[in-house]
Each structure stands twice: as structure tokens, then as C-alpha cells.
Amino acid sequence: MADSGRVNVVFIGAGAVGCFYASRLHHPSHNIHVSLVARSNYAAIQKDGVKLLTRTFGDYTFTPDGAFPSVDAAAAATDGSSGAKRDWHYIFVTTKALPDISDDSSIITPLVGPKSCIVLIQNGVGVEEPFRKRFPGTPIVSAVTVVSAEQTSPGTIRQNRWTRISIGPYTDGLGAENSDLGRRGTECTEALRRWWTDLGGIRDVEPHDEVGLQTVRWHKLCINAAMNPSAVLSGGRGNADMVADDELRRHLLGVMHEIRDAVPRILGRPFPEYMAAPEKIVESTARNKGARPSMLLDWEAGKPLELEVILGNPVRIARERGVEMPRLQSLYALLRSAQAMRKAAKGKLKGGAILTRHNVVAPGGLFRNIVEGEILTKKDLDAAMDRMENHLLKKNVTRETAVRLCESVEKELLGVKTGNFESINTRI
């Protein structure tokens, strides 16, 4: 929340979604100045800004007001010639929500001041609660997006389709709209709607009251909680592939209906009629060939899963209100166990095994014939990649995944000069 004058905005997380919405909010001519806290793509953004290739707005470059390698660096920023510490009026958190790994509310603490509003663009439910507990007097805007975007290389974002963002205030999740905190949250919501719509050209910015925004979150959960964990537990099947299987289709519908039936008891309000019913969601999914849920991609890449906000939090929130969700609880228990077992197995790997960055184990002997100080070429790697692919297929990895993993390993090794087997092991 800013006084009349300069508005300082910072996005924590410079991935595809964060950069896209940041670029549509940055309007220095209207005194709205957006900065980014970036990590892996910091050098690219610092040098060239963010290149956006968009279906909706054409191609353009977004040059942020500032690019910072860390939250602490952003917190140390000063304003102009005055040298005064910068007030951050809007603090966006657009990272993956992984409360079992890191406390995002703690991470942003150096940025939060008396004029701040926190904006959460994260998946799942219950993501706001840690921020509300840590910052009881700070307005929070919760946001849910429907956008297809990807980072094709560091600092280059492609928006494929959709722009919708739903926003609303958050106090305690049950609608204290008349409180001072609720009013301030509503004011921030309206300001963001106005800037994104009138200045940024996004035509489907949807403001909601507090409970209304939570119904949007829970409706998106119908899709995420059904599709994401099921794709992992089914052995890597994509969305359309799952709904084509009779038993999996029945399972997916069961999860969605379980959430839909629980929402009135959890939020005191059912899904509005305009929100798609489970059957409509499944019909739409069947037409979207090739779609693979983000949780499956994270699993295959060996990354942490958004397990708690998509499964754990909904189960706990429902249980606190006397509602059991057995289908969701089963998915949570199974996937949490699978993740824990994989982590334990990773810690036990020794000697003659290679753990690729995609967390698939391959025997070390695959590469023993291509060492001794040579620059690795595709010809050197062809036979090893064939053997690795066959090994993965024998381990019941899908062919599509096996090919993708081998291509990734090959890309990592091409042009590398290695002195011994261990240098390849370390590289991977």
C-alpha cells in the first residue's frame, strides 16, 4: 500500500508465471516500478532483462526496475538520491509452495514494512496461513492463475495461452471483510485489478471477496489434487492418458467430487454454478493431448513436490472442520511415503551407481569406455545412451521419460573433457 507517488513492487521468484505477471504490472510512466528477486536466471535478467514471447501481447522485453540475487539484496535497496531504504509496497511470492522444506513467510521478513501488502501467487490451499501468523497486521492478497507459460531458457519466457488471474483479500480464510485488515486487503485487490487491467491489458483479472477467492482455490484443487499425484502414482501417465483409462477416470472423478462435496462444509459456500463440474473437467482434459502435470515433471526431475499445499493442507483443513476426505488422504499418505522412500534411497547410493539429476539410477559401467581426457562427442555417447535407455526401460520407466532423460544426460556431457570415470559421475 503506497502513498500517492511511487509504488515499489518486488516479485520473489522469477519463473515463467512470476515474470509474465510482473511484466504486465511494470509501468514506470505511471510510477509503478517492478523489481525481481531471481536465482538461477539472475545473470541473464541482470544483463538483458526478461524476453517475453507471448501469444496475447506479442514479443517484448521487460526491463525490471531492479534485479536482485537475493531477498537480502532487495531489502538493502535504496530509493534514488535520498539514499533512504526502499519501502516495498507490494511483495509478490511466486515460488513453489514447499512448507515442508522452507518457510516463505520467514524468507520475506526483511522486505515487509508498515506500508507493505503481501501477494501470494501459489498453488494449493492454506498457503496464506504462515504469512498471516507471521504478519498479523499486514494485508494479504491471495491469487490463483490460469496461464500456460514456460521459461525456455534463462530470462526467456513463452506464454502459450490464457492470462486469467483471480485475486482477493485474505484475513483468516473465512471472510472478515468488515475488519480494518479486510478493508485494506480489498483496497490492494482493487488497485492490482486496476493496474493489470487498465495499464497491463489483461482482460480477465477477476476480483473476489475473501470466501469467493478461496472457492477458486478449492476449485483449482479439484484438478491439481486429482491429476498431479495420480500422474506420479500411475507410473508417469499424462492427463489425457489417465482419463482414457476407465478405472483411473473413475478414480479422478471420485477425488474431484470428494472435494466438491466437502467445500460447503469447509467454506460455508458451495462452488458457484459457473465453475466446471468434475465431468466437464474430465471431458476437457481428454481433449488436451500431451499435457503432463507439473508434479509429475518435478518427480521425474528429482525435485521436491508441492505435496503439503495440494494434499496435506486440504486433508488437515477439512479434518479440523469435521470433514474426512479418504480419497485425498490416501493419495497424500502414498505419495508422502514414496517421496520419503526415494529420498532415503538417494542417501544410500554408493560407488558404482550414478544418480542422474532426474533421480533415475543407472549402472556406472555405461560410461567406462568414453573417458581418459577426450572431449566427449555425440559419437562417443551414442552407445552409452542406447544402453542407458534400455536399462531404464527394464526398470519400468516409460519410453517417453527414458528418451527425455537420456537426451538430458547427453546434453550435459557433450563437449565435456573428462579425466576419469569419476569426473562423469560428478558431472551428472
Image (cartoon, rainbow, N blue to C red):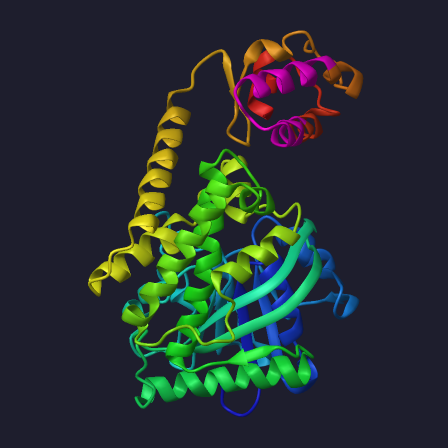
| Vertical arrangement, residue 145 with respect to residue 341, above or below | below
Q: Which residue is drawn at 54% across and 55% down?
A: 282
Q: Residue 138 appears in which quarter of the rendering?
A: bottom left
Relative to the observer, which residue lies in front, 412 or 87?
A: 412
Asked if residue 375 is among those painted magenta in the image, a careful observer would answer no
Q: Classify the position of the C terminus by image quarter.
A: top right
Q: Residue at x 71, y 23 (%)?
A: 416
Relative to the observer, which residue lies in front, 123 or 283?
A: 283
| Vertical arrangement, residue 362 with respect to residue 302, above or below | above
Viewer can see residue 85: no
| Vertical arrangement, residue 408 with respect to residue 186, above or below | above
Viewer can see residue 195: yes
Relative to the observer, which residue lies in front, 265 or 221?
A: 265
Q: Which residue is drawn at 56% across and 82% down?
A: 193
Residue 137 as seen in the image, left or right of residue 89:
left
Most distant residue in the front direction: 246
Asked if residue 384 is among those painted magenta in the image, a careful observer would answer yes
Magenta region, main secondary structure: helix
Q: Residue 211 appears in which quarter of the rendering?
A: bottom left
Residue 262: percent from left, percent from top = 32, 64
Residue 375: percent from left, percent from top = 76, 18
Residue 102 as seen in the image, left or right of residue 88:
left
Residue 325 as seen in the image, left or right of residue 345:
left
Residue 404: percent from left, percent from top = 66, 32
Q: Residue at x 74, y 19 (%)?
A: 376
Tell how many labels. Answer: 0
Residue 178: percent from left, percent from top = 32, 90
Relative to the observer, which residue lies in front, 89 or 397?
A: 397
Q: Give the range drawn in magenta.
A: 383-406
Q: Residue 309 appears in which quarter of the rendering?
A: bottom left
